[in-house]
Structures are given as structure tokens and as C-alpha cells.
Image (tube, helix red, strand yellow):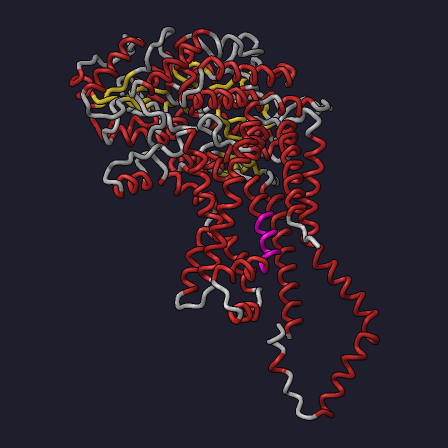
Amino acid sequence: MNKKFTKILATSIAAAALTATLAGCGKGSASSSTEGSGEIALWTHNAGNPEELAAVQKIVDSYNGSQDNVKIRIQAFPQDSYNDSVVSAAAAGNLPCIVDIDGPNVPNWAWAGYLKPLELDADLSKHLPSTVAEWDGKPYAVGYYDVALAMMARASDLKAAGVRPATMEKPWTKEEFQDALSKLKALGTWEHPLDLGTAGTGEWLPYGYSPLLQSFGGDLVNRDGFQSAEGALNGDKAVEWAEWFRGLADQGFMAKKSGKDSTQDFLNNKSAIVYTGSWAGDKARAALGDDLVVMPPVDLGEGPKIGGASWQWGVTSGCSNAEAAMDYLSYSLKPENIAAVAKATGAIPASEEAAAQIPAFAQGGANRIFMDFSREYAVMRPETPAYPFIATEYGKAVQDILNGADAKSTLDNAVKAIDANIKSNGGYKN
Amino acid sequence: MATASLPTRPSPATPETALPPSNAKGKAPKTHSRPGFRREQLSGWGMIAPAALLLLAFIFIPAVLGFGLAFTNARLISPRPVEFVGVENFARLFSDPTFYRALLNVAYFTVVIVPVQSGLALVMALLINKKFRGVNFFRTVYFLPVVTSMVVVSLLWLFMYRKDGLINEILAAVSFGLIDGPDWLGDPNTAMPAIIILSIWQAAGFHMIIWLAGLQGISGELYEASQLDGTSRWQQFRYVTWPGLFHTRSLVLVTITIQALGLFDQISVMTQGGPMDSTTTIIYEAVQSGYRQQETSYASAISLVFFVLVLIVSAVQRYLTREKD
């Protein structure tokens, strides 16, 4: 009886294992872009953002209803694993027709041959420049929106400390910023008056902090040819930036590691000035009303800078029905569609016509200032296929510097790694 | 097992009825051995097949590919053709200070984890090897963290380790505000110890179960005999339990070591190798360069070096724990 039982057990385990394997295989091939007759797959990063997903779904539904040739099918991924998923799918040759891409990664994917240059009916010239990703002189991806970095504070706090609110006409200089932080700290209300979002990881690090470096006069890489970071990322200006940045923590103005949710901390009065993006604008205004002041980032020498480019759409080169994919993208760029997505995300609509449809972003609207920031201050993250590598090296350097590593040698190491990477890829030339 | 067959023995009522079965048993090997042997062999292979296929597809083939890739300049995504570059990746690896830091961190982690975790697991196993009411409750409680995913555990501890997190609050409360705990994961000096504590808490239960199995395999007669000889409890442990756990000990040692060398989940979720490389590990570096930085070949080189290291460590352990005659 014992033996019989063992036999049954073993057989059932084997059967279960086999079924699992088969199921795994089946799933693997099903998730690849099975684009049957007239079906086009679209991958998006916003599974964790129901409002944005719903807005995109609505565009897709209306497009599917508008013609009979193709059906677009959405597959949503959580943002954290989205890039890894797409890169793995690309390596396996299983990309869908339409993909969502984080703007700075577009050159890398275009260089790798995964994207087709866009041929759209829509006129992109009127779009915010930072919503169209170009590489090698051709547009490869286009976004419905952009986001803008800003500093937010309470007018009442600034008044109590005797500090002038920064404006676009007269942003704070480095000295004024230092003075403002000292005065705010002296009020004794906050342990750390400034919150730069130092707990952030991943793409936040280059997105949030490379504009500060650029405002000092440094950069992630020499943009002339994108062949080396020497001098840009480890020159005097860059070292100056690193020491200033580290100094903010040393002087007790900000925490080396801020809270998980900087906006919430600011609203809970745990900080006086928060450095965050336009995505926090609506929430902050709802909580603080007229007391909220939205200020441009500090002018650290070369004027205020913010990062440009958010999530954008591209068509993959392996797409068998690229014409239809392009047609869908053109359709989706109608002002009302752009407005719908921008509204859902609270982001800056890509075109003026779309902005006119959203009261907050229309002339005189409460969020109009973010659009102005984007037009005036946006610096694209370096449009080179080396960007993903540069971003990780810079992110690590930022964290190390914040934790007390020597600025010059940390930046030198980053430059060494970046230059070696560019060289080993033959300069990322076509 | 010996006791399990006991009850069946008295069932034959008479010697006559008892004989035929014993005869049949004696003949069985002769008549059935050839065809039965074949079938057993076949079903044996059949049972190995699923595992063997999976191992081949997901362990051996990728490993061989990885060894090959380590000597090329392959990228995760790239339009450039893959070229053979010799030992360039290894030259770069051995001149990278982060790699040595990762080695040091892993060594630190392993050297602390192996004795502490196995020791703690043994103590827990000894405690729950007693027969008393509610022992199953304790077994479950000790085993619970093992059932929880390491990623989930890491996320929870991430909150507990914060500057104003649970652990610092408790420290402040029990010391009446005297101890102002550090930002555990943000300080290069405390980040690794913090991760070690969490890791031990999560994984000790698993090795407790292995120890427990070993403990229950020691015959009760040996304890009875030692009691007759008037041994103390320590002597019982030293001269009965400890030698009886010989094989279990090797198993626990090898599994903990390999598990410790492969430290990754906690790091990826909690510290991303920081602050200042104080928690980076070899596997983390491999994943970081292979995926985030798209340098497949470099990641393969790291993995190859890691493979050789694990092999050496296991070989040394096998040698040290061999059965001496």
C-alpha cells in the first residue's frame, strides 16, 4: 500500500510539473505579440495608474470604434518592471507594435533598431519640444504630456521667515536660496526645511538632480558628439555642484534620506520647501489653496533648469502593420485626446490646443506656470543611446556624494565608467 | 519504519498459511526481476525527465551560454555584432574597486550568517523537539517568516529600519529616550548588520526544520542508554546529539553558505547596494550591469567568477566535513 501511494504521489507530482512547464510555455508564446488578423498590441507602463490607463483605454476604444481595419489591444505593466519587460521582450524579439517609452530611453532603443521613425499625419511642430523624442534627426516617439519640476512652499511660511517668493522673472540665486534656508531653519518649525526627495531612486536621480548640475554649468556628458563625459561630469562646475548638494545635507537643510512621499510630508508640514514635479500640483493646491506658491528651481549660475521628456509612444520596427500603428498614433494625438490624458494625469498637455481645453492649463490657469517652466527651462536628458548607462552611473554618484563620498573621485569614477562604456560600444554610432 | 511493520506480523494465524507467502517472496526476485527491472528503470527515467528537462533548459544551457558570453562584448540590446574580446571583461572586473567591495560584503555577510543562523536554528530546533502542549504553535511561529516572501519581508523591515521607524521607536521607549537610533539602512556602518539581522530572522526557521529532522532521526535508545550512564544534559548533547547530527550539519552548512553567497533580494529591495557600496553584492552587481546597464557580457563575467568562488567554497566545505575513517 505504501509503495502504491508513493507511486501515485510521484506520478501526480510529475504530471503537475509537466503541466506547469507546458502552461509556462503556452503563456510565454501567448504573451508575445500574437497579432492576428487586424489586431495590434500596445504596451503601456501605467498599470499602477488607473486614471491614465482609463484615459488611454478610452482613446483606444474610440479608435477601434472609428474604423474596421484594426483593433488595438492594450497590455498594461506596472511602471517599476516596465522597462525590464520591454528590454527582455526586445532581446527575445517579441515586441508589440506600439510601446510606451520613457523619453530619455528613446535614442537607446532607436539605436538598437527596435523603433521605427515616426511618419504621422499630425503636425508635431506645435507640440512642446520636450514631448517629441528625436534621434539622428528623426522623430522616434511622441508624448501626450510632459511634466515639470518645481519648488513648492507655503506663502505664509516664506513671509514668516522674511523671504521673497521666487518668480520666473526673478528666480532665487544660490546665495538667496542659502539665505532663505537659513532663515526658514531658524524658525525652528522643521528639522529639515528643504525636501529634495533624496529618498528617490532609479530615474528620479538623473531626472531630479541633473538639472541642478546643469544649472551650475556642468552636464552628464559632453553633448558635442556624446563621446565622453570628461570635463562635463567631473569638471570644476560639477565638483562645485556636488559640494553644494552635499552641503545642503551637512548644514541640516535637508535630510540625507527624505521621507517616502515628499509631497505628503510637505502637506503634513514636515518641510517648508519641497522640490517635486507638476504631478503634485493639484494635490498641493487642493490642500493649501491660495497659500501654495509654485516657484521655479534655483538659478545656480546658468539659470533655472528642469528635466524634459516624460512617457512617449513609439512604433516598433518589427511591427507588421506599421501603417495602422502610425494611423492610431496620429488619431490619438488629437487635441481632445491629449487633453483627456493630461487631465487624467495632471500633467502638462503636449500642445497649446489641448491646453486650451483644460482650464487649469489654459492662459491664466492655476497650472499654467508648469507649462511655462517646461517651455523656458526644460533641458532634455542627453539624447544618446548611452543614456541608460549614464543614468545609472550618475544616480549612483549622487547617492554616494550624498552619503559623504569624495566629490571629485566619485565623479571621476563615473566619468571613467561612462567613457569606457561609450568606447566599448564604438561611440554608439550608427 | 521498523515499528510500522510490527502490527502486520501477528496476522497470519497458522504456520501453514504463513509459509506460502514467504515462498512467494523468495521466488519473486527470480521470476519478476528481468521485466520488472526494465520497467523500474523506465519509470525511473520518466520520473527524472521533468526535472532533468527543466534543469537543462533553465540551468545548464544558460550557464554554458553565460560562460561563452563572458568572453565576448555582447549587449542586452545592441545593433552591433557580438565580438570575441578575450579576457577584457575579466581585466575590467579585477580592476573595479566595487567588485572587491562586493566580495568583501559577501564574505562579511557569509561569515556572520553561517554560524549565527545555523546556531540559532539549532537552538530553536532543540526547543521545539520537546513534547509539551502547544509545541505545534511554536513550530508554526518559528517557521512563519520562511513562508513569507523575502521581498515582502524586506519591504516591511524597510519601514521598521527607518530613522523614525518601529525599531528606533522601541529603542527610544525602552531606554527612556536615551538611545537615538541611527538611520539603519542609510548609514554605511549599520546597513549590513541591519540586513544580516533581517536575513537571519527570515531564514532561520527553514534550517530549524532541517535540524529538527536530524534530531528526530537520532534513536531514543541512545538517550536512554546515556541516561542509564548518568550523563548530564550537556554531556547528552555533546556525546549523543551532536555526533548524531553529523550529516544534517554538513547539509545545513552547505545550504546556508550557498544561500548567503547569493545575497540579492534584500539588497535590491532595501538599499540598492548603497550607501556607498556598503551592501552591494556580487549577484547584485551582475544584475545591475546585466539589466540596468545592458552589459550582458560583463554580467556574465561576474557570474562566472561567482560560480568559481562558490565551487571553491563548497569544495573546501566538502573536504572539511568529509567522513574521516
**Residue B248, magenta (yes or no):** yes
Q: In this view, does A225 lie above or below B231?
A: above
Left or right side of A17 for A74: left
Q: What secondary structure predominates along the stretch shown in magenta? A: helix
Say if residue B45 shows up in the picture: yes
Q: Is residue B119 magenta?
A: no
Residue reaching furthest left? Answer: A160
- Residue A93 visible in this rendered orientation of the protein: no
- Give, as a single range, the part of the protein colored magenta: B244-254
Check the image and report above or below for B272 versus A248.
below
Give the left or right position of residue A172, taking residue A225 as reference: left
> At which x and y percent is residue A231?
51, 8
Residue nearest the observer in this picture, B257 or A164: B257
Give the residue at x 60% y 76%.
B4
Residue closest to the eye, A109 or A64: A109
Direction from residue A306 to residue A44 in the image, left or right: right
Residue located 53% across and 38% down the image: A71
Image quadrant in which you'd find residue A41: top right
In this view, which residue lies farthest toward the front?
B230
Depth check, front residue: A427 or A175: A175
Q: Residue at x 60, y 16 (%)?
A: A420
Image quadrant holding the C terminus of chain A, namely: top right
| Figure check: A35 above or below B72 | below
Which x, y percent locates residue B207? Answer: 52, 53
